[in-house]
Amino acid sequence: MDQNTKHKDIATAERFTNSVKQLKSEIAKVIVGQEDIIHQLLISLLSRGHCLLVGVPGLAKTLLIKTLADVTDLSFKRIQFTPDLMPSDITGTELIDEDPVSKRREFRFVPGPVFANVILADEINRTPPKTQSALLEAMQEHMVTAGGKTYKLEEPFFVLATQNPIEQEGTYPLPEAQLDRFMFNLWLGYPSFEEEKQIVKLTTSEYKPDLQKVINAADLITFQDIIRRVPVADNVIEFVVKAVSKTRPAETNAPQFVKDWVRWGAGPRASQYLVLAPRHLWTAGLPLILTMYGMHLFRYCGTG
């Protein structure tokens, strides 16, 4: 790496650190508490991942996602998932256009709400698996196929889905293939007594936060790229892969309790995410450490 590239990366890392602090500060104007959830949400965003937020009604899941969109200069679309939602309501549909002169008819693709940088899939488990699957290609390949043609989604692309863990009547559990696309499955808990007092005080007054946009699409792509350039030692990757493999009951080195109680272990995406997630810490100038999720997994599987 030449000297100019090094200086450029250092400057980008410093801008990265300042931007993350500003993002947290702006989000805190609206969201009281939930620091860990916000932190993990930003990790996912910076790692090109997707997030599933699970919590009972009233915990500001939707408000958190909307606020994140407000403090970034990114296009935002909200999709309210309902039992009658069709795949074309998400990806888009083809309409027939007629030329007024030649009377010639041809199909024209009208993009759906998935064509945005930040997608809020609200109550994703309230629509059938057929419609849920409309997001699979978009989340993995960042593309949409309709009418035999493939359309590329604009980068960055980030899906944030919410799910209510109660009132399961009339809901459709997310297929394992869908769950596997999410980097984090974040469970939101109730606020503390003091936090709830602050929430009630702010939301029952005339308080209107003045939110400032911190980063745009180009900034975010730059930060995502520099995170991918953070080097990771081969022995760290080997350690992660070994730990993840021990969650699979078919593996010979899996603990007995995994063989007894687990049907399917974590897939390769788990290994990828465990390597990607800590890199933002290194980019921000901190040591490259394992996330609390990784450490818990390693202890649980008896690898360290």
Image (cartoon, grey):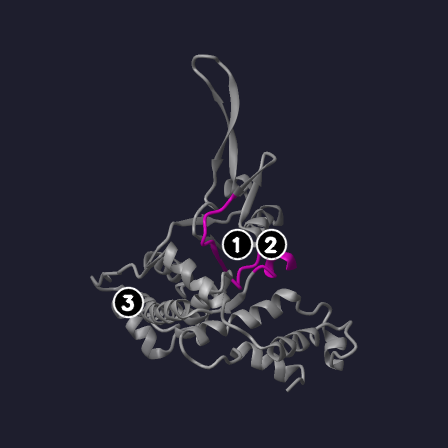
| x and y, in percent, of residue 140 in the image | 57, 54
Magenta run includes residue 169:
yes
Residue at the spot of label 2: 172
Which of marks 3 and 2 precedes in the sequence?
A: 3
Q: Which mark is residue 214?
A: none
Q: Are marks 2 and 3 in contact (CB under 8 Å)?
A: no
Q: Nearer the viewer, residue 32 or 285?
A: 285
Few, some or many C-alpha atoms within 10 Å of disc 1 (few <14, some 14-19, many ≥20)?
many
Magenta region includes residue 46: no
Q: Residue at x 67, y 81 (%)?
A: 301
Image position, residue 24 (x, y; %): 34, 69
Q: Quadrant of the C terminus?
A: bottom right
**Secondary structure under badge 3?**
loop
Q: Secondary structure at mark 2?
A: loop
- Residue that lies at the very extreme toward the bottom in this rendered image: 304
Residue in front for this viewpoint, 274 or 121? 274
Q: Residue at x 79, y 77 (%)?
A: 252
Task: Please indicate whether residue 148 sits to the left or right of residue 196 in the image.
Answer: right
Distance between the alpha carbons at the discs numbered 3 and 1: 27 Å
Q: Would you say the residues marked 3 and 1 are in contact, meaning their CB atoms lie under 8 Å apart?
A: no
Counting from the top left corner in percent of width and height, residue 20 is at: 36, 69
Q: Which residue is mark 3?
A: 29
- Which region is colored magenta? 152-181
Q: Quadrant of residue 35?
A: bottom left
> Looking at the picture, does residue 213 appear above or below residue 98?
below
Residue at 46 percent of width and 45 percent of height: 115
| Amino acid under disc 3 | Lys
Q: Which residue is mark 1?
A: 124
